[in-house]
Amino acid sequence: MGHGMTEPGAARDHRAILAVLLLAGISFALLQTMVIPALPQFATEFGASPSSVSWVLTGFLLSASVATPIAGKLGDLFGKARVLSGVLLIFSAGSVVCALGDSIEVVIAGRVIQGVAGGVFPLSFGIIRDTFPPERVPAGLGLFSAVFGIGGGIGLPLSGLIVDGLGLSWLFWVALLALPAALAARRVVPPSPPRPRTRVDWLGAVVLSAALVALLLGVTEANRWGWGSPRTLGLVAGGQVLAGIWLAVESRVAQPLIELRVLRRRAVATTNLAAFLVGFAMFSSFLLIPQFAQAPERTGYGFGLSVGEVGLLLAPSALVQLAAGPVAGRLGVRVGFRLTLVLGTAFATGSFLWLVLEHGHPWHFVAGSILLGAGISFAFASMANLIVGAVPQSDVGIATGINTIMRTVGGAFGSAVATAIVTSDTIAGSPVPTEHAYTLAFLVAAGGGVLAVAASLLVPGRTGAGGPAVGTAPARATT
């Protein structure tokens, strides 16, 4: 099954492969966000602090950030379908650990195990590149990339229905839908072209993991330890030093964890910067909106909503993401994906600025989340096509995988910073944040959005290696 096949049978094969990949991607994307509206329930259930509970999300994103490039390399070594099946099985095992966990520490450990499924993205990008005809590759990549945002958006309202109807543990039992995807991956996806000389940069993986853990732990625990405490300053400074060491390691090894030469292309660098900032803002909102809405009415600002009611509050955003993806794809083909990326980041920024000014009624959050949903969908649909247009065909898998990593790392920092802000200013005698803390957090997220707009404007209108940054819209991805 090669790039040149266009027969009806080949088309059916592509649809079957894409269906398997989408199921795998949705499994991962749902579990990114389904836990978020339930974080206050985790705190109550296990008697944990807000900063500890935030690691249910941050630990998952951190694990995914490191696992993503490793899984891509292992796919080159042992076959992408085989490794895809393996990471889905590990993801399922982590889900069982979380579902049966009797402490917050066990749940966090299970979430770290689940994060290994971040490898679904580079593996799937590589499978699309290996098995789809060239003219179908941009469409497949765009559609699969959109799963990151759409699945995450659906996970938020779905969380409420599951927690209110079945209980916390069912958030993780639902994730076992990855099991049929693991089986189907081995049966449907053809063997990868052999790349026997591939090596995994384990040293780079260890140093990157240590750098991210140090930085995120320092930011998350800064309020409890003190921003000027030796532990906080030591972790943040140590993380920066380790990040510098990691860059030095990556520039010297023959087969680095992340190809710095690909990162140096202007179109790739600016798109990845936008991806980091969009991830930062997106996961800030995923944390802030549910917690604000669930705050008791006696706080003077909260609505006292249940997890299920928060799900209904966020449902319009998920619907908008589903509808906006095809619109963004068609618009990007006509006017260029840089413009749609600018629009997406501008929509996201506008949503946070709106929430800074207006957050007194539930409908304010509905309006803000609708705008945010459109922004996320426009941004994600654009980034995949910009990356495809910016690099040679042989680097598409590497470049799209790096873009996914940047979103995930941005999300990890966004959740850590949002947690640090809202836990820094609490109502006297309680762990509940003040309204001012939420307003400040929304403002910081808006600042991330403004920087994302600026990064989007720096993306070149036309890219060098791959030609114009165009491609079949995600809406037309009828592979």
Image: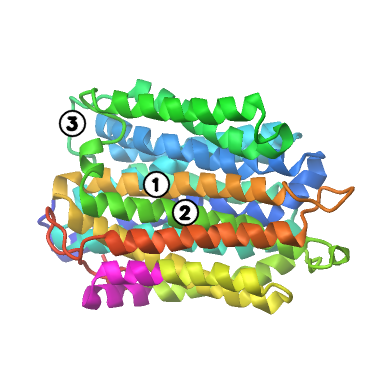
Mark 2 vs 3: CB contact within 8 A:
no
Name the residue type under label 1: Met
Q: Earlier in the sequence, mark 2 or mark 3?
A: 3
The quadrant holding residue 251 is: top left
Q: Residue at x 29, y 28 (%)?
A: 250
* Part of the protein shown in magenta: 326-344
Q: Residue at x 30, y 25 (%)?
A: 248
Location of mark 1 (residue):
406
Whether residue 143 is visible to the viewer of this picture, yes or no, is no
In this picture, residue 343 sits left or right of residue 393? right
- Residue 195, which numbered label? 3
Q: Is residue 60 left or right of residue 80?
A: right
Q: Which residue type carries mark 2?
A: Gly
Residue reaching furthest to the left:
4
- Give the vertical position of 377 relative to 49 (above or below): below
Q: Marks 2 and 3, how far apart in space?
A: 32 Å
Report helix, strand or loop for mark 1.
Answer: helix
At label 2, counting other C-alpha atoms closer than 10 Å, the crowd grade (few under 14, some 14-19, many 20 or more) is many
Residue that carries the numbered disc 2 in the rendered image: 279
Q: Which quarter of the figure is the C terminus placed in? A: bottom left
Does residue 328 show up magenta in the picture? yes
What x and y, as percent, mark residue 69?
Answer: 35, 36
